[in-house]
């Protein structure tokens, strides 16, 4: 959807973006089903807000890894463009999240390795076995682990949607080729 927006759509888009920032392509697509978008907004604010029990860095590790595993270049690029610097992600860590593993030498914090392993297990099997749960639980508390499970699922849904409707990458957002060519 492109401007000018009907008033109800404009209000929803304004609520989804920081003041003065034009709405991203994904949001302009989702508002084609305004009731769905309105229903999603509260959960999206929780997932990206200060009440989430994961740190901003842990959150972004999970989101970027999930989007990379789902091959959703659009959402992967948006999160790197907007949050990578704030999350303190290095080039090696971005590369690892995109095409590496939790065993790469750039991961020295046990909780960060656990986040990546949880996302990988969920992407591979849709489950955590008892050993994986125990390993994650050793470094993440229950609220963090529950938030991580739902965050990964949420970004699976976002990734599926962005890919299936072919949302065009945002101007200036990184592309997978930027990482795989390096």
Image: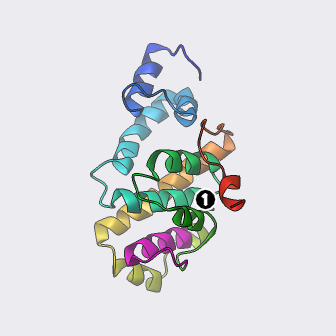
Question: At numbered mark 1, what does the secondary structure look like: helix, strand or loop?
Answer: helix
Above or below, comparing residue 39 to residue 5 in the picture: below
Q: Is 2 or 95 nearer to us in this picture?
A: 95
Q: Is residue 181 left or right of residue 58?
A: right
**Residue at far left of view:** 51
Q: Is 26 or 171 nearer to us in this picture?
A: 171
Q: Residues within 10 Å of mark 1 (few under 14, many from 20)?
A: many
Q: Is residue 111 magenta?
A: yes
Q: In which quadrant will I find the C terminus? A: bottom right
Q: Quadrant of residue 25?
A: top right
Q: Is residue 40 left or right of residue 169?
A: left
Q: Is residue 58 magenta?
A: no
**Residue at far bottom of view:** 131
Provide the residue span drawn in magenta.
104-122
Q: In which quadrant will I find the N terminus? A: top right
Image location of residue 14, percent across then percent down: 40, 25
The residue lying at 52 percent from left, 50 percent from top is 80
The residue lying at 36 percent from left, 27 percent from top is 19
Q: Which residue in the structure is indicated by mark 1?
A: 68
Image location of residue 142, percent across then percent down: 30, 71
Image location of residue 157, percent across then percent down: 55, 50
The residue lying at 59 percent from left, 39 percent from top is 172
Above or below, comparing residue 75 to residue 14 in the picture: below
Which colour assignment does the render follow? rainbow
Above or below, comparing residue 116 to residue 31 in the picture: below
What secondary structure is the magenta-colored segment mainly? Answer: helix
Q: Quadrant of residue 133?
A: bottom left
Q: Is 77 or 155 nearer to us in this picture?
A: 77
Image mark count: 1
């Amino acid at each position: 959807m492109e401007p000018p927006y009907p008033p109800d759509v404009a209000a929803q888009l304004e609520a989804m973006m920081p003041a003065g920032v034009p709405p991203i392509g994904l949001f302009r697509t989702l508002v084609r089903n305004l009731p769905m978008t309105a229903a999603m907004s509260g959960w999206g604010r929780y997932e990206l807000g200060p009440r989430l029990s994961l740190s901003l860095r842990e959150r972004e590790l999970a989101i970027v890894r999930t989007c990379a595993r789902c091959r959703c270049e659009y959402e992967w690029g948006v999160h790197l463009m907007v949050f990578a610097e704030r999350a303190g992600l290095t080039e090696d860590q971005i590369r690892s999240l995109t095409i590496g593993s939790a065993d790469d030498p750039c991961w020295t914090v046990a909780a960060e390795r656990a986040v990546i392993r949880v996302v990988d297990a969920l992407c591979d099997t849709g489950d955590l076995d008892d050993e994986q749960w125990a390993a994650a639980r050793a470094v993440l508390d229950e609220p963090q682990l529950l938030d991580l499970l739902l965050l990964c699922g949420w970004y699976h849904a976002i990734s599926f949607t962005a890919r299936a409707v072919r949302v065009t990458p945002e101007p200036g957002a990184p592309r997978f080729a930027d990482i795989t060519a390096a």
